[in-house]
Image: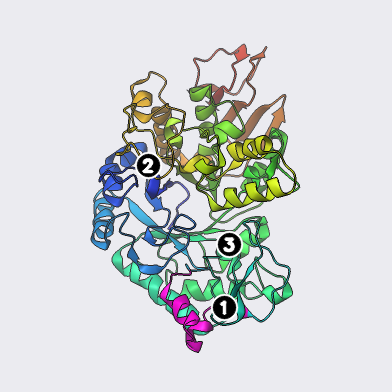
Amino acid sequence: MNYQDKVVYQIYPKSFLDTNNDGIGDIPGIITKLDYLKALGVDYVWLSPVNKSPQHDNGYDISDYNDIDPMFGTLDDYKRLIAEAKARDMHIMLDLVLNHTSSDHEWFKKALAGDEYYQDFYIWRDEPNELETYFSKPAWTFSPELGKYYFHLFDTHQPDLNWENENVRNEIYKMVNFWIDLGVGGFRLDVIDLIGKEPDKLITGKGPNFLKYLKELHDNTFQDKLLTVGECWASTTEEAEQMCTDGLTQVFHFEHLIKTNIDGNKWNQKPVDFTEICEVIEKWQNQYSLSQNWVMNNHDMPRLISLWLDDSKRYQSATLLATLFSLLRGTQYIYQGEEFGMANTDLNIIDEYNDVESINAYAKMIANGVSEEEALRKLKLISRDNPRVPLNWNDRSDRGFGSESPWISFSTDRYNCEQDLASEQSIYKYYQKLIEFKKNNYHLIDTKLDKITCDDNIITINKGPLTIVCNMDAVAKANFNGEYGEVIISNYPTNEQELMPYEARVYIK
């Protein structure tokens, strides 16, 4: 099946919509918004993990793969969500974490209790090596029960599974088929490129057996019947081609989203260079031939209108980015709230942060002599809590989220969906227009770029009869004389002699 003209909407369930006033979003809340998503043009709804979890890493530490966490509802609620989505010709994607489990998972509990069969489900050593986690901590934690160290690339509560053990792989395949039989329409596979790790050789990502395991997972479960997308950071186009040949429909690539990192360190940021962004777009559009996708925002990244542009110019910034990313070849991924211009949050003290990565990074910065003011400035800009705060559905005291006391503080930014929908300059309605155009004219979009340039921060993309022009600057460009045909989409009333701040235009000849 061709997924390239499809739209996937990512939901962070804890922060989407709360229907029982407990401060946590839930599956019934998602069901109430399916018509809203259908009207936007969404085909697939991807939920960040809703499996049972102690929530040390907001659900990416699963304690029971085969059940729903009570904070979100029940398995019957999830079945109803699948059915309600299908009734609207939409599909539900399950977020699966196959690299590690929670330390509360029964497999790990049995391992700690001395069961040798389950001990081999994880990775143990008598002595640790120098590997560190992605959360700024040692990757080995001592278990007094066994007198050994277990391996974890993330939090101490997230022990890595031993994919070298065939029994582990068979348990995973059985679980994946459980959800397929339940009716899910696809999977997002969390950090899937880590399953082939060889920690003794200091190899974490894309180990020697990774592609073998990926192909085996594909052949024993989803095969080519479902949409599958793998989270694979820092992948080349060649690696992505191979992963899609050996088992996945798509691979997430985030090269454009990490270009502001200094020396690969997300906590040290530089201003965005749009020439570099154009180089990334050209590479993935023209050098990669399989199923593509484009991501502006997700649960791990700050809001792009705040990081790249000016979120005080809400409509212009949001619609400019929407134009740039919506009309690239490949599946479009929208993160909740993006469609009405949610911006970064503004958490002012470390106690307001929930994200374990941010808390650990803050502690490390302070220990290394960074001032509290500077450490908090870095967190405000790039923390994973930025996209995770509850959605602002309206301007009531509970923001329409359903509770005035959510699991994490509301954003100080009060711009909301109801306000946007009532506006003459509605970001949501602009997204609708772009998505409708893409679906009806995908044959014009599904092509390599003829040319992409960035001149004076004006990005110009030529592909066949289409030309996309985006002014990435907060200042107008005078004497703009683009002769590209008829303007069919724009976020401003078109003035051919001037390109306004953050103006986007789509031309057709």
> Closer to the N terminus: mark 1 or mark 2?
1
Direction from residue 505 to residue 66 in the image, left or right: left
Answer whether residue 480 is magenta in the image: no
What whole-number distance in Å separates the C-alpha atoms at marks 1 and 2?
37 Å
What whole-number distance in Å separates the C-alpha atoms at marks 2 and 3?
26 Å
Residue on which disc 3 sits:
154
- Secondary structure at numbered mark 2: loop
Q: Which residue corresponds to the image point at 60% horizontal and 34% vertical from the top-left?
A: 307
Res. 495 image quadrant: top right
Tell me whether circle 1 and circle 2 mark residues in contact (CB < 8 Å): no
Name the foreground residue: 286 vs 130: 130
- Secondary structure at numbered mark 1: loop
Which stretch appears magenta?
103-124
263 over 176 or under it: above or below: above
315 over 12 or under it: above or below: above
| The C terminus lies in quadrant | top right
Direction from residue 433 to residue 26 in the image, left or right: left
Marking on residue 144: 1
In the rendering, at what x and y percent does residue 48 appear?
43, 54
In the rendering, at what x and y percent does residue 173 appear?
43, 75
